[in-house]
Amino acid sequence: MTHVLAIDIGGTKLAAALVDRAGTVLRSATVPTPREDVFGALARLVTGVVADGPAPVAVGIGCAGPLNLASGTVSPVNITTWRDFPLRERVRELTGLPTVLAGDAQCFALGEHWLGMAEESPSMLGIVVSTGIGGGLVIGGAPLLGPTGNAGHVGHMTVNPDGDPCPCGSRGCVESYASGPNLVRWALANGWTPNPSPDDSTAGPEASRSPDGAMLAKDAASGHPVALAAFERGARALAAMIVSTAAATEVTHVVIGGGVANAGPVLFDPLERAMDELAGFAFVRAVEIRRSKLGVQAALAGAAKLAWSRGATTAAPPPGPHDAR
């Protein structure tokens, strides 16, 4: 059976897997992203995954951005030692295989579409809500990458032109309202402090670590008014972005993953209410929002699909009605 090598690169972890034409993972491994010699760690990871296994025919990479598809270079915000790093060429040299590159959130969207929604939706938006907010569009069954490979940066769509400045250079970006750290930042500024339950076995560690999105979600689920308000505020920003994206592209489905999505109903219930309020046209109101099915494996699946469709010139593409082109 033929396989491709899928690679997922982020500021927190590096992952690699051998994936067959149906999206089944033969073997995989994950390591933390080091502060120094990131490519050395990636090379060791890849070597371990492919050792004593079937030789892959192509490589697909999903990497945090921004990136430049023309040059194959990446400058991930959270990997400070990589600026205009020639990732595609370095991986090609390492493996000797055809290598294709896309953004990690784009691969998330493509993976969710390929293994979860290809039969029912040719066009969808995938959103990763975590430390930041990333996105990817699949339009007509194909990933929309853009001229430089940076299409889908929905986290930096402006939802409030008079909002706070964003590190990206704009103002009032959805990421400023709905990312995990910014949900926590707003809640802390408005009087929230974590409230670990005395009968919760995690109360000790929670009390000793910095406030985070998981603590905020827990308190929101318990009815803490400020925690609930933080998620209402973030969900409204997400809804404004989704409505605008749907109006522009006519996606029929939205899949949301990332750590903040693990908050469950405290995020998705206010998101549904905000969508009902903000969506106008019938085709926008008809958009269906779902939680990720693949979770942390989605970006690897998308990288594999990218490799099958664009890199595996000696292998047939995976089955399905909507091949990524």
Image (cartoon, rainbow, N blue to C red):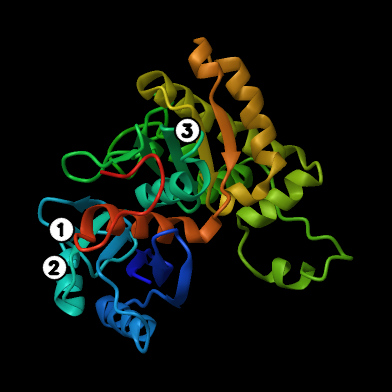
Q: Amino acid at mark 2?
A: Glu
At 72% across and 55% down in the image, what residue appears? 194
Q: Can you say which quadrant of the picture contains the C terminus? A: top left
Q: Earlier in the sequence, mark 3 or mark 2?
A: 2
- In the image, is 221 to the left or to the right of 179? right
Q: Secondary structure at mark 3?
A: loop
Place residue 2 in its image quadrant.
Answer: bottom left
Name the outermost residue toward the bottom: 52
Q: For this rendering, which residue is in front, 39 or 255?
A: 255
Q: Amino acid at mark 1?
A: Gly
- Residue 67's spot in the image, x, y percent? 22, 53
Q: Earlier in the sequence, mark 3 or mark 1?
A: 1
Q: For this rendering, which residue is in front, 163 or 102?
A: 102
Place residue 94 in its image quadrant.
Answer: bottom left
- Residue 95's spot in the image, x, y percent? 21, 77
Mark 1 neighbour density, 10 Å: few (under 14) some (14–19) many (20 or more): many
Q: Secondary structure at mark 1?
A: loop
Mark 1 and 2 residues: CB-CB less than 8 Å, in contact? yes
Query: What residue is shown with label 2?
Result: 89
Q: CA distance from mark 3 to mark 1?
A: 30 Å
Q: Does residue 284 sit above or below 52 in this rendering?
A: above
Q: Which mark is residue 121?
A: 3
At 44% across and 58% down in the image, what residue appears? 22
Query: What residue is shown with label 1?
Result: 72
Q: CA distance from mark 1 to mark 2?
A: 7 Å
In this orientation, does residue 160 appear? no
- In the image, is 200 to the left or to the right of 265? right
Q: Amino acid at mark 3?
A: Ser
Instruction: Report how many numbered discs are placed on residues in the image.
Output: 3
